[in-house]
Each structure stands twice: as structure tokens, then as C-alpha cells.
Amino acid sequence: MAIRDRKRRRRAHPKLQGASRRRFDAEGASRDLNNIRRHLHVAAAYVTSEVSRLVAKGPLTKRRDKLDRRAVSVGLTKNARDLLARLERILGDVNRPLFSGLSFRDLASVHRFLRAIIENGSDAIRVAQRFESGFRPRRKGDSLGRSWS
């Protein structure tokens, strides 16, 4: 699939992402680790370690792709799907009064705001780190702060 098509498909249904994720998970379909990493905006090593931990605890299954041995798919066990179905009912009861006064337009505004925060977060963190590094004491040595003794 072309990158342009993937971006268009992702933009086309932002309001349905939560619902489709629940449907996807409830059906027990598997997900690629790289897709999980991109969706959560975290490092690949973090996803790998957390998935391994959850496989060991039991709610996830992990399977290597037959054609590409580097690719790993992750899926929910039957117990995890049952738990997710119960949780979905509980969250519905909690979210109904929580979001009852908000219109779709309000939620779309919040979604745009949060998406911009996520997209710009890495740049903001880099700026903060550069600012913070200006306050760290430097070692005696060359202009890069390296000591040659």
C-alpha cells in the first residue's frame, strides 16, 4: 500500500479509531509490533519488552510471520477478549455521563488539539533538553566539555 493511501486512510476515519480498535481487538485479530509502536508513539524496544511481559502473563499471544521472520504479530487470548468485552460495558457506563454534555464538534476539537500535541511533542522535548543541557556543569577540558586527563 502506498504511503499516501495509508495517510489518507488514517485521516479519513479519526473519529472511528477507538471503535475500530475495540472491534479489532475483540475479534482477536493480530497486530504487527511496528504498528503498535507507531500508534502509541513509543520506542520499538519498549513495545517489545511490554509485549513479552504480557505474553508471559497470559493475555497476549505472539507469532512470527512465516514469510518475514523479523515480523512479529501480537493477538489477544480468549480470556483477554472476554475481559475486554466486560471492560467495554463498564467504560460505556462511565463515559456516558462524562461525555454527555459534549458535542461531536467539541470532541473533534479536542482530538485535533491532542493530535497536534503528539505530532509536535518530539520537537518540544528536544528544545527542552537543549535548554536543560545549558544548566549542566561542564567538565574541564575542550570546548565540547571532554576531559583529556
Image (cartoon, rainbow, N blue to C red):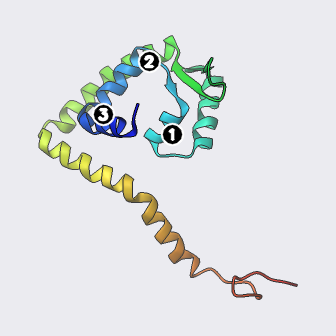
Residue lying at the far right of the rendered structure = 149
Find numbered disc 3 in the image and state the secondary structure of the residue it sits on: helix
Mark 3 Cα-neighbour bin, 10 Å: few <14, some 14–19, many ≥20? few
Q: Residue 44's spot in the image, x, y percent? A: 58, 42
Q: Quadrant of the N terminus?
A: top left
> Hey, what amino acid is under mark 3?
Arg
Q: CA distance from mark 3 to mark 2?
A: 29 Å
- Judge whether residue 132 can be spotted in this image: yes
Residue lying at the far front of the rendered structure = 2
- As drawn, 83 above or below 46: above
Mark 2 Cα-neighbour bin, 10 Å: few <14, some 14–19, many ≥20? few
> Hey, what amino acid is under mark 1?
Arg
The tag on residue 37 is: 1
Find numbered disc 2 in the image and state the secondary structure of the residue it sits on: helix
Q: CA distance from mark 1 to mark 3?
A: 18 Å
Q: Residue 7's spot in the image, x, y percent? A: 34, 40
Say which of marks 2 and 1 sits in front: 1
Numbered-mark total: 3
Q: Dot 2 corresponds to which residue?
A: 83
Find numbered disc 1 in the image and state the secondary structure of the residue it sits on: helix
Q: Residue 120's spot in the image, x, y percent? A: 38, 59
Label located before the other in sequence (3 or 2): 3
Asked whether 5 or 63 is in front, the reply is 5
Q: Quadrant of the C terminus?
A: bottom right
- Judge whether residue 102 can be spotted in this image: no
Say which of marks 3 and 2 sits in front: 3
Q: Which residue occupies 18% across, 34% down?
A: 97
Q: Dot 3 corresponds to which residue?
A: 9
> Hey, what amino acid is under mark 2?
Leu
